[in-house]
Amino acid sequence: MPSATHDRHTAPQPLETIGLAISGGGFRAASFSLGCLAYLHHCTIETEEATTETLLSRVRFIASASGGSFTNLLYATYLYTEQPFGDFYNALREFMKGDELLAQVFATLESDSAWEATPDKQRNLINAFSLAYQQLFDRALPPGSPHKHVTLGLFGNPDHLPPLRQFCANATEFRNGLTFRFQNPDQDSRQGWVGNFSLYLDPRQLSVTNKLRLGDIMAASSCFPSGLEPIMFPNDFTYTGDTPAGGLTQAELSGALICRNAVQQARQLHDNATEAQNQLAPQEQLDLTMETRLTPVAASQPEADAITFGLMDGGIDDNQGLGSLLLADARHRRETGHGYGTLIACDVNSPYMSQYALPQTKTGLLWNRSLRFWSLAAGILFALLTGTGYLWDTTAGTVLSTLGVLGILLVIGLNFGLYRTLQNLGDDGTWGWAATRYVGYFFTIPVGSLLQMISARLRSTVILAADVYMKQIRRMHYQLFYENKKLDNRRVACMLHTLANTFYTTPSGNTRKATSTASCVARYNLSPSALMQQIAADAQAMATTLWFDPAEVSGERRDKLIATGQFTLCYSLLLYLCNLEQKQPLSPQLQALQRRMLTDWQAFQQNPMWLVKTPLSK
């Protein structure tokens, strides 16, 4: 536990208290961030009382999205149950072995007994993942634990405050399109809602919130679009009662849910504030106004139907977790008079993307003809086969005729399906009118051109959703991160691509080094070795998946990602301290930390993987 204390007017020193954001990115993000936490645990620093503690013990808040939530939530589980960091490290590293998670998920999907305790859950892929995740967290409970399952209640005891005060796992709700934050509030030292401004769980009903299971939260945070279906609230978060606290029902969750119209609520708050100001209302009336904000839907609209909404990947709205980190920093500033000493972003995504390549149009006899032509040709062929009785008396003739019939039915079905799809784009609007009017032209276009048009649209839509939108949202969050003057001298960006040879030796990488970091790189010999750059490049090449395929297993990609998180954070922290000392002298404690990290950097230069398998028992 950190020993330094502050009043409302004393800001913490750099790295004295830390807020951390972990990006999404499947097992790539989980492995990289595991390396980041491992290096923070490895780094020790002296306190003013001449004791020693790790940098990880100074982390007060962690925000995450998608795959980064594996690291966030599992670390919190081991920390709050007072288990060694090494146990957490080994458990998560082992969990990400090969495709064992996928095997467990499909076995769960197949097993009837696996769903007995969750009768209201839909039997689908995302809920199979949630049950598998719950087993991961439940295995983390130590022998003799009073808890049977890991729920938010494990982290909401105001009398039990480990170094990590609060975590936040981002999801995205599909009612308003906003980030839905799963946090561990206790309304004492840990503030913040489960939800967002428009849709949240009543903070006065913590007994309900505390029964949310971490497996369901993890599933919501890592629910990849297109690959998985949304996890539905409240049904998919319920379970039967096999603990003293009982289960969690739809009625409980619906009763705790507050859903408000943001426009109407803003107008109401404005009117109330104006009226209170005009009447010089006492504090009690202002408190009543704030109390109105927390009125559940059921209290004001008793006849309203129960609200159901879908939740998906937290990376849709805030894949870096920076929005949640900045909100937590602002809360901390309001409560204590200052923010965290340092904010660290661990990010496996980059601002770069592969450009769009136009699909080529296939040519040739088959591709140059239209659907109408091939429909007519199939009809003529069938007429020839059946009308003349050709080969009808033989097995071959029967087969050919049958294939002819099936071919015609297939062509008719495809034609009709295409027609109805285009026609149903908007039966009641202008799109429906245009589709109905011009749908026939698609049957006269060469098949090769038609397929090229479809392929171009599919490919561009995937790039738009997976790259253009995601990277633009990423830029917006980093813009907020870097343009906020209150965060000056408090930012550390640890990005997976920074030291990869695919970036470090490029003009963009050199330009970056030539501006703010060139002098630090030269002064402390921080240029990465060729082996470090290659390992980082191999780590960066991993796709966003929840498995490692056989080639990745044999190539040790999981451990390369962990190592890249370790030596990239070492590099980023050394740059951070170097930039700080150019503005003011470092404290003796930070100088000693800098010397130890320089020794680590030299070891990484020689063997980038040296810390991955180092025993971690503390």
Image (cartoon, helix red, strand yellow):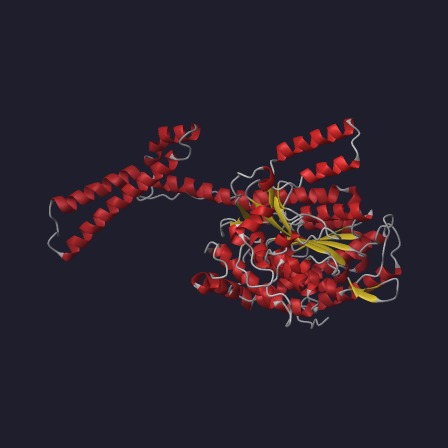
Viewer-side residue, 26 vs 393:
26
Viewer-side residue, 260 vs 403:
260
Residue 558 seen: yes
- Quarter of the image holding residue 178? top right
Residue sitting at 79 percent across and 36 percent down?
283
The N terminus - image quarter: bottom right
Residue 174 pos. (x, y %): 55, 43
On the picture, is 479 further left or further right than 550? right
Residue 18 pos. (x, y %): 76, 55
- Quarter of the image holding residue 431? top left
On the picture, is 122 further left or further right than 195? left
On the picture, is 506 further left or further right than 368? right
User: In the rendered view, would you say 34 is above or below 345?
Assistant: below
Residue 111 pos. (x, y %): 44, 64
Viewer-side residue, 72 vs 261:
261
Residue 406 pos. (x, y %): 24, 48
The C terminus - image quarter: bottom right
